[in-house]
Image (spheres, coloured by chain):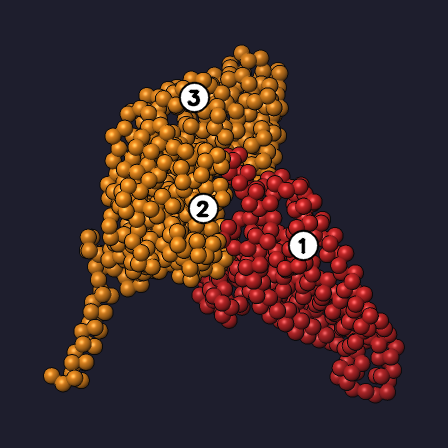
Amino acid sequence: MLSYILKRLLIAIPVMLILIVGTFILMYTAPGSPFASERGVPPAVLANLERQYGLDQPFIVQIGSYIWNLVTQFDFGPSFIYRDQDVNDLIAQGFPVTLTYGFWSFVVAVLVGGTLGIVAAVRHNTWLDYLAVGISVGAQVLPNFVLAPILVLVFTLWLGWLPGGGWQGGQLEYIILPVIALSTSFMASIARIARASMLEVLTSNYIRTARAKGLPMRRVVMRHALKPALLPVISYLGPAFVGMITGSVVIDVYFSTGGIGQFFVASALNRDYGVMMGITVLLGALTIFFNLVVDLLYAWIDPKIRY
Amino acid sequence: MSKFTLLMTTALAVGLSGAAFAQETHPETGETLAEDQSFSYRLLDQFPTIDPQLIEETAGGHVARQIFEGLLTQDDQGELRPGVATEWTSEDNQTWTFTLRQDAMWSNGDPVTAQDFVYAWRRAADPATASEYAWYVELSQIEGASAVIAGEIPPEELAVEALDDYTLQVTLQAPLPYFPQMVVHYTFMPTHQATIEEYGADWTSPENIVSNGAYILDEIAVNEFFRLVPNPNYWNADSVIMDEITGLVINDANQALTRFRAGEFDMMDDLPAGSYPQLEEEMPETAHSVPRLCSYYYTVNQSESGHEALQDPRVRQALSYMINRNVITDQVLQAGQAPAYNFTHWATAGFEMPEIDYASWSQEERQQRAMELMEEAGYGPSNPIEIDLIYNTSENHRQIATVVSQMWRPLGVTVNLSNFEWQSYLDIRGNQNFDVARSAWCGDYNEASTFLDLLTSRNANNDGKFQSEEVDRLMAESATMADPQPNYTRVEEILAEEMAIIPIYHYTQNFVLDPAIRNWPMENVENNWYVRDIYRVAE
């Protein structure tokens, strides 16, 4: 097990390097510059700016020093647009926000989605099943960029119950709408996957044997069916969890939470090379890490899998 | 009187005065003021910085106007009024002397002196600062600015001098009658040397910042909100009524409008495309449309990389004449914009609108003339041309480009539309990789030259590469003239004869504002507002 983990972590190093170099090249070749503006910056000023940010150096020196600073000091460098901040500051401000609403969205999506899916499968072809499927299909076809404005319209403008955006250090009333908007489609996917895999498990031979021995349905489901039925759900949860805690651009844009999703979009549009690289590296590392966690969970759940 | 009754009396007196304050009326107008004197507004995007010498866009500029105060500020008409300087004089429009008030203080209690301005202005030009707005110092014609920016001479040689603590003298390389208008700009606001030297790039954070305006920065969460509170050390603190300013960053315009309707904040501009007519009808007291010092036009590429036909002024004229501006302002935009036949915005201070021939014609006359011109130039439906029209991604620009391409069709002009996101767009337009490009220019100061200088042959923003020796000469001359209006009129005439650019409309600023907020500077065409001037009345 330990050697497996080590091996996976070692493989992660070249993967991260490829990610960094690839992103750097894409960024380097994109037209425009962080310092371009409608006013047309005079050449002398532009030269000063480029010197200050090291953009006058050859490509290989730029990428080399970026990786060096990242590896040796964990320094993501300066933001090219937010002149008073560096990338570490911006991530330190934005990531906890995203992590908070992402975590709660995950909890809600797993609990609600899992329950819906399992209930639907166990009560296959009854009104409960139809209701659960109905809810999850409804949630699936309602993307969060449609849901978010509707939520604000209903809960902020019409009912006046909740603020339409902001974060205020993560007070409960500010978290509710982002969590609903973010968790809905994940919840729907989880419900669908859980239902399908539970149905499959319930028709398998060993479940039939268990039923034939006269075990009550509840016990069959909890003891024998649940764990194997969760395997496909878990493999979905890895990327879903990364997707949620790294935030959704839509959530950040619509609810002005100050999360990193917003920084990510803005950095691409403004050519804020530092922020764009920083967030890409962060998301890449998280993806790799959680995929590893999921693989380890597999081994725990499924005795057939050994590392 | 026992100690206890004394205490009670005092408490009662304090309580009463508190209650009296809540019922307070405005000292000048006598209106009853609301108890809640807070102002909140929506920002489209997070401002990159509030360091006056580094700011390069409007959102940060609005914040700087609240927390810093330059030599001069603007009143609600956009006219100059004293800021830190009480007097400003010049004999020859070339050497300017500003006398500073002696009671101006920084938020930490230090006096604001002429040296603070000297420091800030040198800092703006200093290559080590690497400010994108260093060009503004160059534009203001201060002697030595270009050389300092290029790193040829040290920043200390910029011709800004503190004659004593309260007298600032500036020497320009050429006379500039509107120099005082230029010092209103945020680039020329003072900054506190000791603070910047102590904290470096972190000096603008709420715990470090020292500023000299009516407000100070209290809290900021990037991409979420910021809050300003009154600066007790501001020299005119007694006149400040609003006791809190909050800015909320909300990217999505529709979302912002919903939250405005829910009463979450008091003001927003950058309204959703096409929403203004309905808002005006629904909330006439709340929706406003005021002139704004920007002109919308199409740049025609007259350099070698442009379409051959566009080198011919007759073709450019024909294209311009075919555009029915009224359709664009009244049916596409519908927010009070003025059709434009010249470049300089009609509301520019001291500017007399020139009489442009084709402005007075009917649209039928223009179209007829356009067909004739096109034929004379050897083009037309029998010899059609194909041109590329580019615009930066936006619903309004797309609609206008579509309408214009339809209007050009009868001339035998086929238009290929393409849109690019902003950074790519600047790159493409700046390198003349287009035939016709959507453009807009907003005045940096309230004087016609801020527009007309753009079309001089050496201007870096002359993206169409229009060249006219006469325009260059007239504009160079105008800088030193007591009354430059005749030159401006002549330049506008040349622009129309040559159709150097195709003017389309003059902007309005469209916004919604809670009607309880009073004294908003509706007539300041540069959209420079100071929260210390506004107040909220009781409903």
Image colour for chain A is red
Q: CA distance from mark 2 to mark 1?
A: 31 Å
Closest to the camera, between mark 2 and mark 1, is: 1
Left/right placement of residue B59 relative to residue B426 reads left
Q: CA distance from mark 1 to mark 3?
A: 51 Å
Q: CA distance from mark 2 to mark 3?
A: 30 Å
Amino acid under label 3?
Asp
Q: In this view of the protein, which residue sits in the foreground, B187 or B403? A: B187
Residue A267 relative to residue A218: left or right: left
Q: Secondary structure at mark 3?
A: helix
Q: How many marks?
A: 3
At x 79%, y 64%, the residue is A8
Other residues around mark 1 within 10 Å, as few (<14) / some (14–19) / many (≥20): few
Residue B240 is situated, as x and y percent measured from the top left of the image, at: 27, 56
> Of the residues shown, which amino acid type is indicated by label 2?
Ile
Between circles 1 and 3, the one closer to the viewer is 1
Query: In which chain is the residue bearing label 1?
Result: A
Corner quadrant of residue A129: bottom right
Q: Which quadrant: the C terminus of chain B?
A: bottom left
* Other-residue count near label 3 (Cα within 10 Å), few / some / many at <14 / 14–19 / ≥20: some
Q: Chain of mark 2?
A: B
In the displayed structure, would residue B330 be above or below residue B115?
above
Image-based side of B307 in relation to A42, left or right: right
Residue B472 is marked as 3
x and y, in percent, of residue B290 in the image: 36, 41
Using a 10 Å C-alpha cutoff, classify the residue at mark 2 as few (fewer than 14 neighbours), some (14 to 19) or many (20 or more): many
Letter of the chain in orange: B
Q: Are marks 2 and 1 on the same chain?
A: no
Q: Residue furthest left?
A: B1
| Residue designated by label 2 | B55
Q: Amino acid at mark 1?
A: Trp
Q: Which mark is residue A68?
A: 1
